[in-house]
Image (cartoon, rainbow, N blue to C red):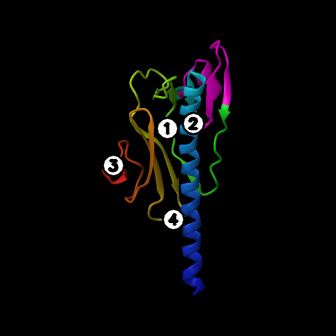
């Protein structure tokens, strides 16, 4: 009985860690959006790639803190941390290329560097090597404001566009 139960329990725990960490990122995206609306000022959800974050006040504050968020002050000369980057537990990995998003005061996100239209697409790919199926959590943004999370049932990384199987 233990030979069957222990591996299943480990798989369940790894899956729960994966989902909980993905939910922490979803919460971060939503908090960055709400902060932009509340403050009537730009906020940025940070990438793990400095060049993607940009070189302006918000981008510089981000550095490579994937999942952190910063708000621009009223003068536009400094950034305030509003969310710390989530901790990625051991056994999980965050694929490079987390989207850096700049939220405007209406709560719509665009790509932080050079983006003009509301962002739609893959935000991040979180994976675990401890489980063999459904081992990726893919976060997507639709029309600059709606975040969704889904488990990828096929092998490989998250697709860049949200699969119809992920839409609710």
One can see residue 112 in this view? yes
Asked whether, in this view, residue 62 is left or right of residue 99, the answer is right
**75 relative to 18, above or below:** above
Task: Of the two numbered discs 1 and 2 on the same chain, state the one appearing first in sequence.
Answer: 2
Label 3 sits on a secondary structure element that is loop
Q: Is disc 1 in contact with disc 2, using a CB cutoff of under 8 Å?
A: yes
Neighbourhood count class around disc 3 (C-alpha, 10 Å): few under 14, some 14–19, many 20 upward: few
Between the residue at mark 1 and the residue at mark 4, the CA separation in whole angstroms equals 23 Å
Residue at horizontal 65 percent and vertical 25 percent from the top: 61
Q: Quadrant of residue 48?
A: top right
- Which numbered marker is on residue 131? 4
Q: Is disc 3 in contact with disc 4, using a CB cutoff of under 8 Å?
A: no
Q: Which residues are magenta?
A: 53-81
The residue at which mark 1 appears reads as: 97
The residue at which mark 3 appears reads as: 163
Task: Of the two numbered discs 1 and 3 on the same chain, state the one appearing first in sequence.
Answer: 1
Q: Quadrant of residue 92?
A: bottom right
């Amino acid at each position: 009985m233990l030979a069957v139960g222990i591996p299943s329990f480990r798989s369940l725990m790894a899956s729960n860690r994966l989902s909980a960490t993905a939910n922490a990122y979803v919460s971060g995206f939503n908090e960055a959006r709400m902060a932009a609306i509340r403050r009537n000022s730009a906020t940025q959800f940070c990438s793990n790639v400095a060049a993607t974050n940009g070189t302006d006040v918000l981008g510089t504050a981000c550095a490579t803190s994937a999942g952190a968020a910063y708000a621009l002050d009223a003068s536009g000369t400094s950034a305030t941390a509003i969310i710390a980057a989530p901790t990625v537990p051991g056994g999980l990995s965050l694929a490079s290329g987390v989207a850096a998003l700049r939220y405007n005061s209406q709560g719509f996100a665009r790509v932080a560097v050079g983006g003009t239209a509301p962002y739609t697409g893959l935000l991040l790919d979180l994976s675990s090597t401890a489980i063999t199926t459904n081992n990726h959590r893919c976060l997507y943004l639709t029309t600059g404001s709606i975040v969704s999370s889904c488990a990828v049932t096929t092998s490989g990384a998250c697709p860049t566009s949200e699969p119809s199987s992920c839409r609710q």
